[in-house]
Amino acid sequence: MTASERLVEYLHLTVNTAVVVHDPANMFYLTEGYRGEGLVYLTAERRVIITDFRYTEAAEKDAPGFEIVMTDKDHPAGKRLAEICQQDEINEIRFESNYISVDELERMRTAVGEEVSFVPLKKAPQLLRQIKTPAEIVTMRKAGAITSEAFEAVLGKIRVGMTELELRLELESAMYRLGAEALAFHTIIASGVNGSLPHAVPGARKLQKGDMITMDFGAKVGGYCSDMTRTVALGEPSPEMRKVYNTVFRAQAMCEAALAAGKNCFDIDKIARDYIDSQGYVGRFGHGLGHCVGIDIHEDPRLSASCHDVLKAGMVITVEPGVYIPGLGGVRIENTCLVKENGSEPLTTARKELVVL
Ligand SMILES: [Mn+2]
């Protein structure tokens, strides 16, 4: 069954109802390959990509099951959508209320006319995207492997005096060399005292002996993201930072071991939080434990104190506890993991034991 068929079935679409999707991640998912702009129109009977000249050839290649309708100066997307809705006698459009702007909604309403009602899709495509298909898992395994290999490749290049920006360049070029088509997100490099900033932006700081260096990065392959964090030491770290490392290492390992279908997101997050607190770091792990990953780097559900969703087999989720101490530094260790019926499997496989360079 294709992704668009899954959505039609999930929504129980009746004949006069159409789904209209603008979010590029949802368009990519539902077409199983289209990466351009425009919109996707779906009914139980018909699947269409409405786009402009720049993307029509790519759309034909990447989404063979779809009809491609081209816009031009006299026939903008709204007009094309109105024509198709009229042909199909559509009286209801399900739209992405979480994605398109108020202006875009108004434009669509004006184009298709008052007789068509607009009903929010309520993130139905995102809900389907939570469970990865075997083909998606194959792709995400590749993204994880490239990310893990890039870590090993960069270890030999880290040295005193190198800047965070230089290290970022090494890491990112390693990912591209190994086959990444893009980066899954902006690489984070946080060295020494900068390590207390969970989302540090790499800068001109030079690496020093005794630094802990946190690298949070990921390759994108076949449209799917990977997300991994490792913290390494440049020279022997202080006993204090070693204790921080061991605490985060244990928290990460405990949560990864607890991950399985049927478990509650809240409970997994609590394992890390309770353990980190018990080691004397109350308030030093201020973010959620993890998030699902897929076409987007951050997807639902989340491993956090405010998420009570139940994990299902086929979800791909990060486990990334951290401890951050202003003025001293920080440690985060993260794997992207596949949730299975009776456990989990890391898709990022680089070693997690402290590497002292
Ligand atoms: Mn992450």
Image (spheres, rainbow, N blue to C red):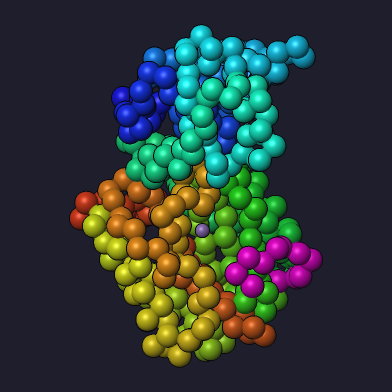
Name the residue nearer the viewer: 97 or 179.
97
Point 43% across, 59% down: residue: 302
**Which x, y percent locates residue 221?**
52, 38
The part of the image, by quadrant, that contains residue 35 is: top right
Above or below, 232 against 55 in this view is: below
Q: Is residue 265 above or below residue 185?
A: below
Q: Magenta-highlighted stretch: main secondary structure? A: loop
Kindly identify the residue that appears in the image at 38 percent across and 18 percent down: 15
Q: Is residue 181 visible?
A: no
State which quadrant residue 160 falls in.
bottom right
- Tell me if 198 is positioned left or right of 103 in this view: left
Going by the image, does 317 lie left or right of 36? left
Residue 355 image position (x, y, % from top left)? 50, 70
Residue 247 drawn above or below residue 94 = below
Residue that appears at 39% across and 14% down: 45
Residue 256 within the magenta-colored segment of the rendering: no
User: For the C terminus, which image quadrant?
Assistant: bottom right
The magenta span reads: 197-207
As for residue 205 lying within the magenta part, the answer is yes
Of residues 5 and 145, which is closer to you in this image?
Answer: 5
